[in-house]
Structures are given as structure tokens and as C-alpha cells.
Image: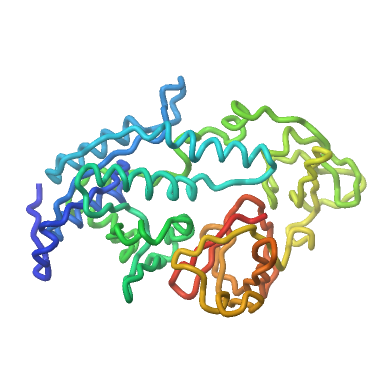
Amino acid sequence: MPTFKKKTTLSTQAAKTKVIVGMSGGVDSSVTALLLKQQGYVVEGLFMKNWDEDDGTEYCTAQQDMSDAQSVADMLKIPLHSVNFASEYWDDVFQIFLQEYKSGRTPNPDILCNKEIKFKVFLDYAELLGGDYIATGHYARTSTKNGRTYLLKGIDDSKDQSYFLHAVNEAAFSRTLFPIGEMKKTEVRKIAEEYGLITAKKKDSTGICFIGERRFKDFLEQYLPGQPGNIESSDGDIIGQHSGLMYYTLGQRQGLGVGGLKTSDDNPWYVSGKDLSRNTLIAVQGGSHPLLFSDSLKVSELHWINGLPEEIIKNENTDFSCQAKTRYRQDDQQCQVIKTEGGYLMKFNTPQRSLTPGQSVVLYRDSICLGGGVIK
């Protein structure tokens, strides 16, 4: 095992500061723990079990992840605690996830998990362990100015995870460390390999634990049986059958089973809307069809990480200019935010494709994440 050296710039305060690292069994959280130990913090790990995988399936990898986290903790010579938050996850994340799908929307459980579990329940539990801070392997950063803590994008544009953190409160960020937010993913892998961490070459998790590698539709229909209905063109012609509105997202192309119709050309079909009252899926032809695009969206409420911007406080009818993302890894889009009686209206300079109810719009000013809300 390599010998860990404290950085020469280490303050004596770090040696008295305990950090509880959320260790998932992946390379990012492993390197997070390693870096904090190098910096002289008192480091302890915590493995969170957020889903009971004892359901007869092989899709949840919690047992293997726990083993990998323990191997890294042993190598770093730090304690690893384990806690089961499955009950909290079920009540505060999964039930909302199901309700949103049942209502015809497409939720993002990662955002809910960060808000309700990783930066709330985890933070409370870390306090019981005597932690001064928590740390995670998210690709994000924080900055403190005039007593305020701001959420910033991670340095690696391709891995930046601030989108998933926009619903977390400033108070939680003030007690959180993101050591790898200043790094590229390639650097993180390199560090893990140099120190011989078992997770160095472990494949990144590509989905939610409770779904794993199985087809999303196969998982969802266990909890929400679909109601088959018609697929209609934008002109109202019946062109096929769907297996349940909840199984489709706006902009989706695959899995519609529509094509080769005598009355249409060979362009592929895309989901452009859902009519819940008639249990009907609306589809259009061609990826550039006008019905796939919109230059505005509405949200009922916005979570502002650091409070309302001054422009909105001074005049509620003033356009607030900023950048926005309506999906993860999207390039920043210029928009204006307008306070309305029922929430907020956002107008984009460029029409946006497949704005999806239930997904989140996240606001930025350059590298600072301002907050966001759920698209209506």
C-alpha cells in the first residue's frame, strides 16, 4: 500500500476535521476518499444501501459495490460504516417516481435522490457519526463568498453533475466537499490506477440501481401496468398501438412500431405528445418536425440555491437573463426567466427539442448553478 503524504499547504485545522465520505463502490468516491486522506482530514466512509435488492433479481449490484467499497476502505485504512436508507428512498424518491409516471410525466430520480437522501438523510447521519463535513464523488464544485456557498459546474464539461444537484439547499453545500470536481475523469482514473485501487477500472454506473441493466419498460410494468391505446398522427389518423403512455418519452423514436404506412413517406416517427384524457400517444414524422420544438416552457416553482436573484426581487415582471439546460449534458441555452402569477415562464432564444414534463430545467450564470425546477 502506498504511503500517504500530507500536502505541504495542509492547515492544522484539516487534521481536526472529520469528513464522512459517501462511498458507493465506484472509482469516483474511492478517489474522493483517497484525496481527502492525503489532505490530512480524518476520513471515514459510509456505504448507503438505498434499495432492497433481495427481490429475486440479479440487477442491483449493492452487494458487489459494498465489497468494493470495503476493499478501498481497507486499503486506505479508514473505517467504513454501512447504513440502510431503503425505507427513506422508497417513501421520498420511489413513490414520487411512480406517481409522476402514472401522471404521464417523466421524472428524474437522481435529482430526487440527491435532494432527499444524499444531501439530507446522509448529512443527518454523518452528524451522528461526528462528521464535520460530508463528501461525495460528484463532478461539481462549491465556492464561498461573503458567507454564501455557491454551487459551480465541475471542471470536466463532459462529466459535470451540477444539473443533478440543483435542488439541494445551500446549507447542505456549505457542509459538503467535492474533491474531484476540480479534475477530469481521466485524471481520476489515473490516480486510482497509480494507487492500485480495486475500483480503478470499474465500469461507471449507467443507470439507477433498482433498474440496473434490465429494460426500463420491463421494470416499470411491475409497478404500473400499462393501458394500451392508440398512436395517432398530428392529423388525428390512427397509425398504431402503444402499450401504455408511461413507457414513452417525448422525442422517442425507438419502440413505436410505426412505419411503412402507405399514406406516409419513409421518415421515422417520433413521440410529440400525450393525450392523457384519451390515453393517446401523438407521433410525427421526421426529427425536425415543428411539433417536436418549443421556444418556451413553464414551471410552477423554482428552487433558487442562493435565493431570488436581485433582478426578480426588484421587479417581478423583469426578464431575468441566464443560461439553462433542459436535460443533462445539453449545451447551455440562453433564456429569459419571467415571473408569472402561476410560477415562471422561460423563453429561449433558440427553439428547444422535446421539452419533457417531469424533467428539470436548470439555470446557470456562467459556471454558477442558480437552481431549477420541474417542467410543467
Left or right of 85 on screen, residue 18: left
Number of numbered markers: 0
Which of the 4 image quadrants contains residue 152? bottom left
**Residue depicted at x 28% and y 59%:** 177
Which of the 4 image quadrants contains residue 133? bottom left
Left or right of 231 on screen, residue 322: left
**Residue depicted at x 51% and y 74%:** 309
Of residue 130 and residue 3, the one placed in the foreground of this image is 130
Of residue 373 and residue 107, the one placed in the foreground of this image is 373
Left or right of 237 on screen, residue 61: left
Q: Please name the colour scheme applied to the rendered image.
A: rainbow
**Residue depicted at x 67% and y 27%:** 225
Q: Quadrant of the C terminus?
A: bottom right
User: What percent of the width, then of the height, locates residue 265?
Assistant: 86, 52
Q: Residue furthest top?
A: 56
Which of the 4 image quadrants contains residue 326? bottom right
The answer to whether residue 217 is above or below residue 334 is above
User: What percent of the width, then of the height, locates residue 82?
Assistant: 27, 35
User: What percent of the width, then of the height, locates residue 288?
Assistant: 75, 62
User: What percent of the width, then of the height, locates residue 26?
Assistant: 32, 45
